[in-house]
Amino acid sequence: MISFCLLQMTGQRYKRTNFEDDDTFSNGPSTPPGIDFFPSVALKGGLSAWQKKTRLERVLIVFLVVLIITVIVLAAMLSVRQVQTRTVTKIQTVQPDYCVTPKCVTVASSVLTSMDRSIDPCEDFYQYACGGWEKSHPIPPGHSRWSTFGELVRDNQVIMKNVLEKPLSSAMNEAERKAMLYYISCVDKNETIEDLGSQPLLDVIRQVGGWNISSGSGEWDVNKWDLQTVTENVFLLDLSAFFWTWVGEDDKNSSRNILQVDQGGITLPDRDYYLNKSISDDKVLSAYLEYMTEVGVLLGGERNATEDQMRDVIEFEIRLAEITIPSEDRRDVEKLYHLLTLRELQSLASFMDWKHFFNTLFDTVNTTLTSDQEIIVVAPKYLKNLTSILQDMTSTPQKKNTLNNYLVWQVVKTLASYLTLPFRNARKILTKAISGSTGEEEVWRYCVSDTDGVLGFALGAMFVREAFHGDSKPKAEEMVTEIKVAFKKNLPDLAWMDDETRAAAIDKANAVVDMIGFPQYILNSTRLNKLYQELEIRPDEYFMNNLRNLRFSLESNLNQLNKKPDKTIWSMSPPTVNAYYTPSKNEIVFPAGILQAPFYDKNNPMSLNFGAMGVVIGHELTHGFDDLGREFDKFGNFRPWWNNASVVKFTRRADCMINQYSRYVINKEHVNGKQTLGENIADNGGLKAAFHAYGTWVDTHGKEMILPSLNLTNKQLFFLGFAQVWCTRTTDETAHMELLSDPHSPAKYRVIGTLSNSIDFAQQFHCPVDSPMNPSKKCEVW
C-alpha cells in the first residue's frame, strides 16, 4: 500500500545497506580465491609438484595455508559481528519503545481509523489524514457540514443539557436560575408557544408602525408613514435595517468606546447571492421569496398579494447589494476608519436625521448626544449611495410601501423563529437552498445552543464547574507560554524584517494578553448576578424572553459609550468550541469548550496536543501580525509602527499567499485568496510556532514513546494531529456559501495550503521536492 511506502522505503534503505555489507562475506565463493585445498591434478611427465617437495617444505606449506585460512575466517567473523552491531543500532534508532497503555491504544486507534493509508502523504495529506474519517462520518440529518468541531460541540451540548435539566434550587445563584428558566421556556413542554400562535409578533408589528400585508397587525397609512420613525422603531428592538450601528472600541484609541456605523441591510449571507440574478430563475432567490411569502401568509396575508410585495422587497435588497462593498476590499483599516461628528455624518448621508435617530436610541439609557458627538463611519461610500436610493424609494406611495415592507420584514424574519412550528418550518425553505440542509435538530440541542446565546456566561459557570477542572487551565497556560516563546524565537530568523520592526514585534508579542478557559468573574455569584440583573426571564414566555433580551442587549451596548473598554468581557461564552484574537485589546482567548480532546487532553501524547491545540494557540497569536493585526500596536491602537521597508517586504510575501490560495478550487469555484489572507497567514504562522514549541518541549522533557500501529514518529504525529482536527464534510451549497462569505479557507486547504508551505513537514515526511505537498516555491510570512 502506498500509505506504507515512505516508511517501508526508509526500512528498505537500511536493509539495502545491510545487504550491501553482507555481499562482502556471504555472496562470494565459499573458499578463498586462488587456493586449492585438495589439489589432485598431477604435473605432466611424472610426479606432481607437491610430491617433489621435501617433508619439511610440505609441512611449512600446510602450516602457511592453515594460517591464511584462519586469518580469513577470523576476518569474516569480525565483519559479521560489526554488521550485526550496526543493524541492532539502527533498529533501536528507528524502533523506540511503544506506548501500550489503554489510553495510548485508544488514541492510536482513533487516529488510525481517521486515516486513509492508501494515500501517499506527499500527494494529498488531507486525504491521507482524513479519508477514513470522511468515509465513516456522513453529515448528520439537519446539518450542512460536519467536522471534529461539530463532534465536540455535540459532546459539550450533552454536558450543558445535564446541568440545565437539574432541579431548580433556592441555593443556586439568580443568573444560573435564569439560564435554567430560559431553557425551560425554549423546550416548552407545556406548549405555551403553540397556544399563543402568531399574536406576539403581530403585537410587535403594530408597535413598529403596522404592516399592510398581515391582518391584525395594525392599520398602515402611507400618508402618515415616516421613514425616520419606523427605522428608529426597528433599531429600538436591537435589530437593524439599511445599516449597522453599535458602540465598540476605538481602533485608534483603545482606551475608549465610541459610536460606530457600517453598511448592512441584506438578508442573504453575501452580496453575490443577489448580483446578476433573476428571482424567478435563481435557486436561492426563489427560495427566499417562497420563505417570505409563507411567513406573510402565516401572519394573515393573502398569498398572491404577499408574494408580489415580497418580490419588491427582494428587488430593493438587490439594490442594497449593488452598493455593498465586498469583504475582500475591506481589509485595509486605514480605508475603513473615518472619524466624523454627527453633524458631518448628516452632510454625508441626509436620508436620516442622525442626531434624532441616536438620541431616540440613547434615551433608553438616559444619555443625550450633541451634533459634536464623534462617530466612526466604516463605509461612507455606502451611506452616500444609500442616500440616493432612499430618496428614490420615498418618491411614490408604492415605493414607500416597499420600504415599509422591507423594514417590517427585518423584524419579522428575526422574531418569527420564536413562534410556532409552522413559522420555524418556513425558515427551512431558505436554509435548505443556502446550506443544502434544513438545519433541523433535536429540540433540546437547539435550546441548549439558544440558552448559550442568551445567558452564555451563566450557563458557562455551570459548564465550567461540571467539565473544566483539575489542571486543564494551568496546562493550557503553559502551552500558550511555550508557543509565544517559539514565535518570538523565530523572529530573528526572518531576514525580510528590519531590526527596529523586529524589536517592536517582540515587544507586541510579549504584551499579548491570554485568556484561558473562562473569565474569572463568572464564578463570583454577586458579579454574575449583576451582569444579568436587568434581564427578566420567565419559564412560560419564550417569545417575550427573547424580546426582553434584545432590549437588554441594546441597552448593555449603548451604556458602554465613552467608557473605557472592559478587558474582562469576553466575546465568546466558556462552552464555545472556538478561539479568537482581538486587535484592539491585543488579547487571545481560548474558551473552556475547545480545551478538550481532540484539541487538548493531558493524557494524549504532547505531539498531538501541540499539533491540535498548539496550532490553534499559534494561529490566534499570529493574528496579531497578519495583514490586519499587524497594523495595531501592543496597546491595541491602530497606528504605523513598522519600518516602510518591512511593510513592502511583508506585502510581497502576503501577495504570494494570496496567489497560492486563489489557485485552490472547490466544486469548480476558486478560493478567494484576498478574502482569506488573514486566516491563511495565521494558519501558517501558527503551525510553525507550534512545531518549534514542540521541539523545545522534547528537548526539555525527553522523547515521547511512540503510539502503536501507526508507523509514525512523534514529529510526524504532530502534523497528523493538526490535519485531523480539520476533517470535514460539507454540502455543496454550504461550500459555495463559505467561499463567498467565510474569511477562512475551506478545511481541506487549511491543511494542504499550510503544510505545503512548511519545510518542517516536508523534512519529517521525506517528501520529494516538487511533489504536491512539497512545492519548490513556498509562501512564508512568519
Image (cartoon, rainbow, N blue to C red):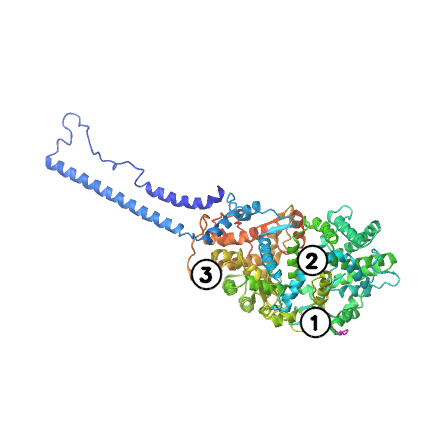
Instruction: Residue under label 2, please give it.
Output: 188
Instruction: Residue under label 3, please give it.
Output: 697
Q: Eyeballing the image, is 431 above or below 356?
A: above
Q: Is residue 591 left or right of residue 532?
A: left
Q: Magenta region's main secondary structure? A: loop
Seen as rendered, the residue at the extreme left is 55
- Magenta region includes residue 496: no
Query: What is the secondary structure assignment of the residue under circle 2?
Result: loop
Q: Position of residue 685 (x, y in %)?
A: 55, 59
Q: Position of residue 182 (x, y in %)?
A: 67, 62
Q: Earlier in the sequence, mark 2 or mark 1?
A: 2
Q: Eyeballing the image, is 123 above or below 624?
A: above
Q: Residues within 10 Å of mark 3 (few under 14, many from 20)?
A: some
Q: Position of residue 649 (x, y in %)?
A: 58, 60
Of the two numbered discs 3 and 2 in the rendering, the one whose residue sits closer to the viewer: 2
In magenta, the rendered stretch is: 368-377
Seen as rendered, the residue at the extreme top is 45
Instruction: Residue under label 1, please give it.
Output: 559
